[in-house]
Image (cartoon, helix red, strand yellow):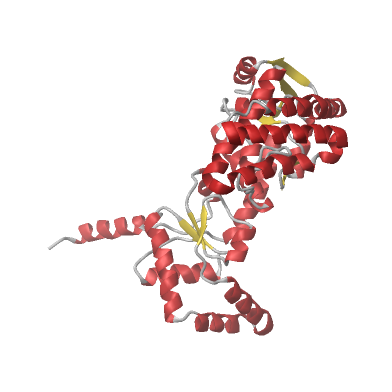
Amino acid sequence: MRDTLDLFIDDTACVEMIRQDTDDYQRLFLEDIPLMDVRAPVEFNKGAFPNSQNVPILNDLQRHDIGTRYNNEGQDAAIALGLELATPDIREQRLQQWKQFVTAHPEGYLYCFRGGLRSRTTQAWLEEQGNHYPLIKDGYKAMRTYLLQQLEASVQQIPFVKLSGFTGSGKTRVLNKTRYHIDLEGLANHRGSAFGSNINDYQATQINWENQLSIACLKYRHHLPNSGVLLEDEGKRIGRNIIPDAFYNKMEQSSQIFLERELEQRISIIREDYITTNWPLYQQQFQDMANDKFSSFVLDNLTRIKKRLGGVRYQHIHNSFVKALEQLFTTGNCALFNEGIRILLLEYYDPMYQYQLQQKQAKILFRGTEAEILAWVDDHLKTMTL
């Protein structure tokens, strides 16, 4: 027979193995902990977190009906309706979905909007099946508030340096070759120009974009606590995502370094980034419709800046791109795009960028080639104070 001490040790070990509910939001985001979001899809689609998966306890209609009952008759009546809607079939379906998540992500946590009835009901149903799964205290609302607060702290604590350069100079390429950066365009899933949308034109909601930005800054502060950060010089809007005011205002006030690149190199970079890289993706996704879809991508985006180009210049570039598209579809050669790209750079993007630089009157700390910029960044951003 085992003695009392052995039983006590075993019981203690079991208790230690049971993970507790948490409000350690920093760890959740720094370690990319998987999160099971049991809110309704309409809530999830409005705003969530990068490592969350929507496995709802209520669908949108059920959430609406229970919310109406709560407002009209109170909490007890709302709970009663919830129990009525949770038929055995629905309950079994929910349990199977939750158990799949729990099995796939044993280190994860679950949450609802405020860490209340929905998350605790989910937790209780799982517990009845022998699956203990911890929840996040105070739920989505507390985590969202935490990220907004941390974004403000990041703006205060991280020294910013902007990477400037004419369109096509390859700023994003250079940015991603140093560890001392945050890629705003990468987070926004957009290149930040009239031709910047990706093949699916997908961007996160504004809330999700802000969450991603805050998490990226939080990780930067944690892993590189004494370093400045290099940010690409951006406008207020990147595609449909808007840079938060405090973050953008600090960017506008920050010093910058300027990437220099020859015109022919810039033309080549633009052609590669927007034509030769994108065209195979369109072929793969759209197949027989690829020619029409890619033509729309090029020509419709050109139309978006028609007024600023002026009618004559727009028509010249449009005709040039039509011929270039025909050659691309026929031979696979994209060399004819060079003419239209050159005009866009010299007569539209460059004058616009020069005007913006003059208006901002930002201090330029350094000018150089790609290699010189990277060397400067390694020397100056590793340790930098405000």
Q: In which quadrant will I find the C terminus?
A: top right
Q: Quadrant of residue 374?
A: top right
Q: In x, y percent, where is residue 231?
A: 67, 31
Q: In the displayed structure, would residue 105 be above or below residue 333?
A: below
- Name the residue located 66 percent from the left edge and 53 percent from the top edge: 205
- In the rendered structure, the answer to whether residue 124 lies left or right of residue 210 reads left
Residue 334 in view (yes/no): yes
- Name the residue located 63 percent from the left edge and 75 percent from the top edge: 64
Q: In x, y percent, where is residue 74?
A: 64, 82
**In the image shown, does 22 or 362 lie closer to the viewer?**
362
**In the image shown, does 12 or 254 lie closer to the viewer?**
254
- In the rendered structure, the answer to whether residue 217 lies left or right of residue 350 reads left
- Name the residue located 68 percent from the left edge and 23 percent from the top edge: 266
Q: In the displayed structure, would residue 219 be above or below residue 84?
A: above
**In the image shown, does 70 or 295 lie closer to the viewer?**
295
Q: Residue furthest left?
A: 1
- Name the residue located 61 percent from the left edge and 57 percent from the top edge: 142
**In the image shown, does 280 or 58 lie closer to the viewer?**
280
Q: In the displayed structure, would residue 86 be above or below residue 357?
A: below
Q: In which quadrant will I find the N terminus?
A: bottom left
Q: In x, y percent, where is residue 223?
A: 54, 33
Residue 229 in view (yes/no): no
Q: Looking at the image, how many numbered discs can be counted on the residues?
A: 0
Q: In the displayed structure, would residue 113 be above or below residue 182?
A: below
Q: In x, y percent, where is residue 294?
A: 64, 42
